[in-house]
Image (cartoon, grey):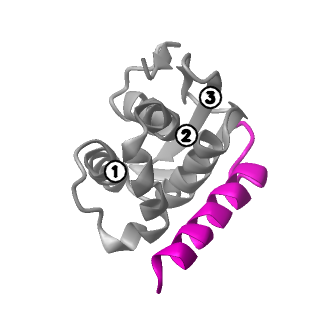
Amino acid sequence: MDQELLEELYQSLVLDHSRHPRNFGTLTCSCHAKGKNPSCGDELELFLDEKDNTIRDVKFSGQGCALSMSSASLMTQAIKGKTVEQAQTLLAQFLDFILDEKKLDEQYEPLHIFAGVRDFPLRVKCVLLSWRTLEHILRDETNQKIVSTE
């Protein structure tokens, strides 16, 4: 597939997930955290319903740029139904993929659309907001903290 067509497909996927985010809403659960990206104004709250080491449901609410919203939407799709350990593995791989340009497992194919953001440090923070918020939940560091990408 030629590079121009691939970029167009990736761009349309980002726009689709930002305009029609999957798993958008709230949950009544004990696992939640708020995230904020002061440099861009993105804000989100992530809700995670975990039972028997499995993420039964996950939702997010908030507002932000297309990259922030699409990243949260795709992240929630990727972790829903997974074990906590699987979510932690994906989180570590995704952070390495974005921050250290390491390879991301092929099973997480839709997340590859964010590879180009590496060239724009301020945009990296937009993409990572939901992931950093998830990181705090999985580390059990929520305690009503607001996670910042700064």
Q: CA distance from mark 2 to mark 3?
A: 10 Å
Amino acid type indicated by mark 2: Leu
Viewport quadrant of the C terminus = top left
Magenta stretch containing residue 42, yes or no? Answer: no
Towards the viewer: 149 or 122: 122
Are dots 2 and 1 in contact, CB under 8 Å? no
Identify the residue position indicated by label 2 in the image: 48
User: Which numbered disc, 3 or 1, marks the residue that appears first in the sequence?
Assistant: 3
The residues colored magenta run: 1-26
- Which of the pair 67/71 is nearer the observer? 67
* 34 vs 148, nearest the viewer: 148
Residue at x 78% of width, y 52% of height: 19
Q: Could you say which disc has been placed on residue 45 in the image?
A: 3
Q: Residues within 10 Å of mark 3 (few under 14, many from 20)?
A: many
Above or below for 92 versus 122? below
Eye-nearest disc, 2 or 1: 1
SS category of the residue bearing label 1: helix
**Type of amino acid under label 1:** Phe
Q: Is residue 144 above or below residue 80?
A: above
Other-residue count near label 1 (Cα within 10 Å), few / some / many at <14 / 14–19 / ≥20 = many
Q: Amino acid at mark 3?
A: Glu
Image position of 71 (left or right of 96): right
Which residue is located at x 67 percent, y 65 percent?
12
The residue pinned by badge 1 equals: 94
Mark 2–mark 3 CB contact (< 8 Å): no
Could you tell me residue 36's position as x and y percent?
A: 56, 21
Q: Position of residue 96 (x, y in %)?
A: 25, 47
Is residue 3 visible to the viewer in this orientation of the structure? yes
Check if mark 3's residue and mark 1's residue have beta carbons within 8 Å.
no
